[in-house]
Image (tube, rainbow, N blue to C red):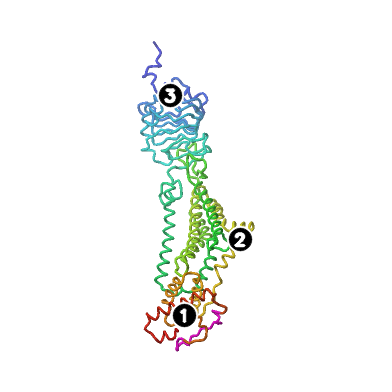
Amino acid sequence: GFDLRHNPTVCPLERNTLRHFYISAKGQEWTESMGWDDEYADHCSYYGVVCNDESQVVELHLANNGLSGTLTEKVKNLKFLRRLDLSDNDIKGSIPSGVGELQHLDHLRLSYNAFTGEVPTDLENLQNLRLLHLHGNRLTGTMPPIPSDFLTGVSSFVSDCGVPSDFGTPIRCPECTMCCNLAGNCQSTEIPTSFQDEVLGFDIHQQFSWVFGISLATYMMFLLIGSFAYDRLSESRSYYDRSMKERDKKYALNKIGSGSVYSFFLTKNWVAWFIAVIVMGIQAWILAIFVEAARLEFVDDNSDFIYSWRCPRNEIECDDTADQDVEGWIMFAVLMASHLLSDLLNGSKLLVLSAKRRHSLCERARFFVGGSCLIFITAFTVYASSVYNVAIARSNTDIVINSVIILFVTQVDEQLFIVFSAASPKSMKKVERHLKQDIKKPLPPKDDDDDLIFDVVEHVEDQSKRSQTKITNYFREVSEDISAEVEPKAEAVVTGRWDEEQFDGERQLSIRFDSPKTRGKTLAPESAAAVIGVREKIDRYDEHNTDDEEQMMRLH
């Protein structure tokens, strides 16, 4: 009749719950347990217990106090509990589902213990949570959908959802704001997971890849259209200048690099083209590995992403330990510009050359492919270096080291050129011979009229193996654009009239077969026959279309 343990007035329910809690968590081993072992002490005076004016337990702070054992299911009886901090102890077993019945709970810290098993689904009933720390345990499975209306801070919802983990797959927690791994390193899930997200706001890697490709294509199309329009609006006589075309070819070789495999794009050798494509593919593949390794994946341990955050045991807020700053990124920009800007400009110049009318369609295609490949590899290198630095660089020196490593990839084409030369010198000499045959040494500039004459002769010889109809049309197209002063001279050369002859009394211009521009220049028999046919067709054409009889007499 004198047992008052179940009398709520003499022995409140919360006092009994705390007693069970003390026994379950091995209170005799606690670092500090003042009042907990006193049967007559008011439970609101226990160490770590905070009550309201009505003697209801509203807070329980026992962090880093040597707790072990298990967490009792009867903790659900602390109906008015708002804060429960049992972090940095050694409590084992599973998290009791009764925790989910604490409707007033807004702070729950069970981090750095030895809890195992899955997180109870009852936690989804905690509608007022503003802080939930479950990291530093051995929890598995999937985190229940915790209401996240108030879990807005970067350190508000932390769990062991990072990699590497104690288990093959870490706990899945889509709503977590911070994920920690086995080493105790953490990473915010609210920051961009890649460089493209941080700079441009893209959500997924595939989306940015499309934009990256379209941006490059737009830039190259702008160069092509601009050069094409300028070439046609300028009405330059360089369209017929052979020496200028040869200068362009040699210029292209110098810009793309004679010691680079990319120079193979300027040849007509398909084997050389195949080698160049393979080398470019190797470079792109290596750079793609860096890009993929830079992605922040919380369920895949293949990422090189370095977690830069720390969530101390004795603090609620997590800290970002990365110390790279603007100075490091300025050094990055200097490195990229000094090593890659010239390649970007040279590739752009090759694209400009590919739009010039003075080159054949095949030559323009080679310039286009060579320039496009150079621009693509250069832009991809900058992107890969950027995303990899965002992923793993945690100091300014890290940025420089990573950039230098990736810049070595841009030297692969030159190093493989050396390897190919050592492995098969005959084949490389053959490729170099093709380049030399296709790219002749530019001739010194002479009189403009002589340049035009020599160009006409060369073009006629090149076309001699084609049908006479094409030769006739070609010569007419050229001759129509030649001024009236130069046209008679050009036709005289084509008809084989190499003797000295005046065509303009004012300028006293003459043509000689042994002149510096034409010395040693002879027409093959089949070329001569084709030229005669051209001459006859032009004569018949001019008889019906010229009103200048005096000029016709001179032409004949």
> What residue appears at the point 47 percent right and 44 percent down from the top-left corner?
296
Q: Secondary structure at mark 3?
A: helix
Q: Where does label 2 land, which residue?
A: 428
Q: Alpha-carbon distance for marks 2 and 3?
A: 79 Å
| Residue 64 in sight here | no
Q: Quadrant of residue 229?
A: bottom left
Magenta span has 544? Answer: no
The residue tagged 3 is 73
Q: Nearer the viewer, residue 517 or 310?
A: 517
In this rendering, the answer to whether 458 lies above or below 415 is: below
User: Which span of residues is magenta-colored?
Assistant: 503-518
Q: Is residue 235 above or below residue 510?
A: above
Q: Which type of secondary structure does the marked residue at label 1 adopt?
A: helix
Mark carried by residue 8: none
Point out the frontmost of discs 2 and 1. Answer: 1
Q: Amino acid at mark 3?
A: Glu
Using a 10 Å C-alpha cutoff, classify the residue at mark 3 as few (fewer than 14 neighbours), some (14 to 19) or many (20 or more). Answer: some
Question: CA gap, disc 2 to disc 1?
Answer: 43 Å
Residue 491 bears which disc, if any? Answer: 1
Looking at this view, name the residue that lies furthest to the bottom. Answer: 505
